[in-house]
Image (cartoon, rainbow, N blue to C red):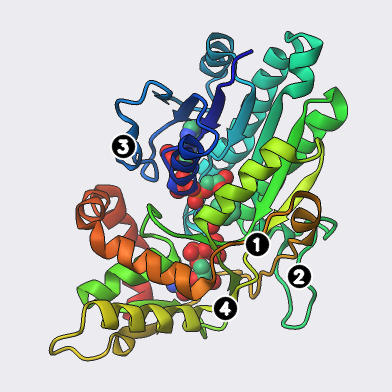
Amino acid sequence: MRDTILVTGGAGFIGSNFILSWMETAGSEVINLDLLTYAGNPANLSSLDRDPRYLLVRGDICDADLVGSLLRKHQPRGIVHFAAESHVDRSIASPGAFIRTNVQGTFVLLDQVKGYWSELNAADQAAFRFLHVSTDEVYGSLGAHDPAFSETTAYSPNSPYAASKAASDHLARAYHHTWGLPVLTTNCSNNYGPFQFPEKLIPLVILNALEGKPLPVYGDGKNVRDWLFVEDHCAAIRAVLQRGRVGETYNIGGNSERTNIEVVNLICDLVDEMRPPRSSGARRNLITFVKDRPGHDRRYAIDASKLTRELGWQPAEQFEGGLRKTVRWYLDHSSWVESVQTGAYLEWITQNYTERLAI
Ligand code: NAD
Ligand code: TYD
């Protein structure tokens, strides 16, 4: 077994940030298995193009032969499993892809890893880790005064995305319980930061605000999310991979509950400050309330005290500071923005917003 880790979905938003920070901290070899769907962008990792410690393999986690041969060839000591379909609105429009990648893909990966792991010697088996990256959305929706989700909150997924992630969490748990595979699961709240595909709320609003387009807010704008800067998520994953107790799940969150309208207002003010508006006036004037998402979860909040208590992790970034860095990043990376605002992106914007904005 080598010091290598196999990352799935490493060309996506969180995976790219994770690989970049892994190279700066742990520094060992990374194999990135990514299908490069609309959400995967190898340019996120172009700074590693000549780094001998990094290899991108374009492929599908549902391809058992490919996964099995990669494991035997590269002999990783751990897996960090990000690959997924990740956008709730797309899961409502076309749930099939979510079942395929999130459920079937996680099953194939777990099963191939079990086969590889069972062939290792006892010391390597004990050192091996499979970290399954999941979401707080598996717990469902909270009322305004409910306590935050803890690791013992019952699963109650509401969207096809959340249901597919819940199914994958159960499979990961079953592979540990039945065969002793050294699985760890993390359930994290909403992330934001560099490289996020602009179909999600924060980058969508930053780019629309810059371009003077309507800022679509679903429903009454009072849905609450618990926002975490992506680098803090990456630090938590490293802590769990290196020091987490096998078989456990760890919630990860930012202690930063905000309503959507608060988030959108803050983005407007930051964009106004960094790119003062010309004739069109303050960006807040662009806010447009639109038709709600069906089954829209009202509130998410994470109790991450287990992770703090056991592994000493805490978020380093406050929401306002992290959002400022994020707006600055999108302003400074206009060529990255142009490169992702192409076919699949434009199709999605038409599909999701034409009818909503007409109301
Ligand atoms: P993303 O959509 O930005 O990236 C997903 C990546 O997976 C892409 O690079 C894509 O090409 C790849 N992929 C998709 N299907 C694949 C397949 N069949 N085989 C191989 N690769 C495939 O997602 P993200 O926001 O970076 O999320 C990463 C993980 O973190 C997901 O598992 C998600 O459920 C979880 N998560 C995300 C958030 C969030 O706020 N974004 C919060 C908590 C948990
Ligand atoms: P999103 O970024 O899609 O993440 P998630 O649905 O996984 O929480 O959405 C965050 C919140 O913002 C969610 O309550 C839905 C809302 N939202 C809008 O109001 N307008 C939009 O255009 C989008 C994409 C999301």
- Nearest to N terminus: mark 3 or mark 1: 3
Rendered-image quadrant of the N terminus: top right
How far across and how far down the image is residue 133, in percent?
Answer: 63, 44
Say which amino acid is labelled 4.
Answer: Arg
Which residue is tagged 1? 253
* Pointer 3 local density, CA inside 10 Å: few below 14, some 14–19, many at least 20: few
Task: Between residue 111 and residue 74, name the one nearer to us.
Answer: 74
Q: Quadrant of residue 285?
A: bottom left
Asked if disc 2 and disc 3 are in contact, CB closer than 8 Å, the reply is no
Which residue is tagged 3? 47
Dot in front, 3 or 1:
3
* Pointer 4 local density, CA inside 10 Å: few below 14, some 14–19, many at least 20: some
Task: Between residue 64 and residue 225, name the one nearer to us.
Answer: 225
* Pointer 2 local density, CA inside 10 Å: few below 14, some 14–19, many at least 20: some
- Nearest to N terminus: mark 2 or mark 3: 3
Which residue is tagged 2? 148
Residue 230 appears left or right of 112? left
CA distance for labels 2 and 1: 10 Å
Name the residue at 49% across, 27% down: 30
* Pointer 1 local density, CA inside 10 Å: few below 14, some 14–19, many at least 20: many
Q: SS class of the residue under badge 2?
A: loop
Say which amino acid is labelled 1.
Answer: Gly
Q: SS class of the residue under badge 4?
A: strand
How far across and how far down the image is residue 283, in percent?
Answer: 29, 85
CA distance for labels 2 and 4: 14 Å
Compared with residue 113, is residue 296 higher up or lower down, i.e. above or below?
Answer: below
Residue with the most extreme left position: 279
Dot in front, 4 or 3:
3
How far across and how far down the image is residue 223, in percent?
Answer: 58, 78
CA distance for labels 3 and 1: 29 Å
CA distance for labels 2 and 3: 38 Å
